[in-house]
Amino acid sequence: DAGVTQSPTHLIKTRGQQVTLRCSPKSGHDTVSWYQQALGQGPQFIFQYYEEEERQRGNFPDRFSGHQFPNYSSELNVNALLLGDSALYLCASSQRRGANYGYTFGSGTRLTVV
Amino acid sequence: AQSVTQLDSQVPVFEEAPVELRCNYSSSVSVYLFWYVQYPNQGLQLLLKYLSGSTLVESINGFEAEFNKSQTSFHLRKPSVHISDTAEYFCAVSERASGTYKYIFGTGTRLKVLA
């Protein structure tokens, strides 16, 4: 049974560009959350999707947007990249019903903005 | 909003020695607490969780954590560490909104087990 799958694993982009990161949740999970983990920091909540809608959002600018598809997979888009967007982006899935039992995390996408 | 404080950014300890990683959270009516572990170049793995019931919770690899409501703490302990326990450990608290939960993480504690 596959866990959470994220692609790509590594990415290098130039400042000002746009990037799309992808996530497939664990089988049976319907809720996807995205986190940004800067070097040496804990994960910071970006947003959460359920039933193809953004349900919660953290303190991130509108440059960060997302989408959830009918098969529960999700994308994170970041526009107008800044150097400070360099981080490990983690996708986590859960079941909305019983969602407080903890997330299953993917291995992340390491984004480097130069 | 809830918050989590992990005061120790790094904890070096010799193999087979005991260890305690500290975690304090902001008070709330209902508290759900978690410890996650992150190995190098990997995502986070759930180590253990406290939802309700017994205040002492255990993981399958010998870690335990105790929920202390009066001290708003959820410290992680292991009586004897192994080299393989070297990793970053994150304490998290869940916050309910819009019918679902999000998790708020501390800044992490890097555990380094020395031979």
Image (cartoon, coloured by chain):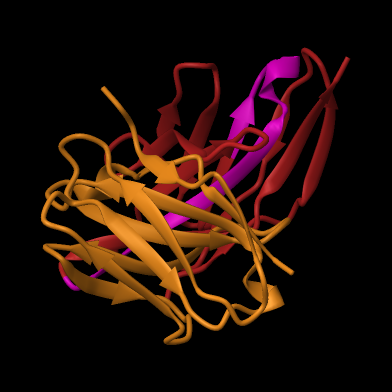
Chain colours: A orange, B red
B112 in relation to A72, above or below: above
Q: Position of residue A59 (x, y in %)?
A: 47, 81
Q: Position of residue B99 (x, y in %)?
A: 15, 67
Name the residue rendered at 30%, 47% in the picture: A93
- Look at the image and tell me whether residue B41 can be seen: yes
Quadrant of the image occupied by residue A4: top left
Q: Position of residue A58 (x, y in %)?
A: 42, 76
User: Between residues B98 and A78, which one lies in front from this camera angle?
Assistant: A78
Q: Is residue A19 left or right of residue A96?
A: right
User: Between residues B78 and A103, which one lies in front from this camera angle?
Assistant: A103
User: Between residues B79 and A113, which one lies in front from this camera angle?
Assistant: A113
B101 in relation to B21, above or below: below
A83 in relation to A7, above or below: below
Name the residue rendered at 85%, 33% in the picture: B12
Q: Is residue B70 left or right of residue B76?
A: left
Callout count: 0
User: Which quarter of the figure is the C terminus of chain B placed in?
Assistant: top right
Q: Please tell me whether residue B96 belongs to the stretch shown in magenta.
A: yes
Q: Position of residue A69 (x, y in %)?
A: 17, 59
- Look at the image and tell me whether residue B81 can be seen: no
Bounds of the magenta segment = B76-98
Q: Please tell me whether residue B39 belongs to the stretch shown in magenta.
A: no
User: Between residues A19 and A84, which one lies in front from this camera angle?
Assistant: A19
Name the residue rendered at 33%, 44% in the picture: A102
User: Which quarter of the figure is the N terminus of chain B placed in?
Assistant: bottom left
Quadrant of the image occupied by residue B6: bottom right
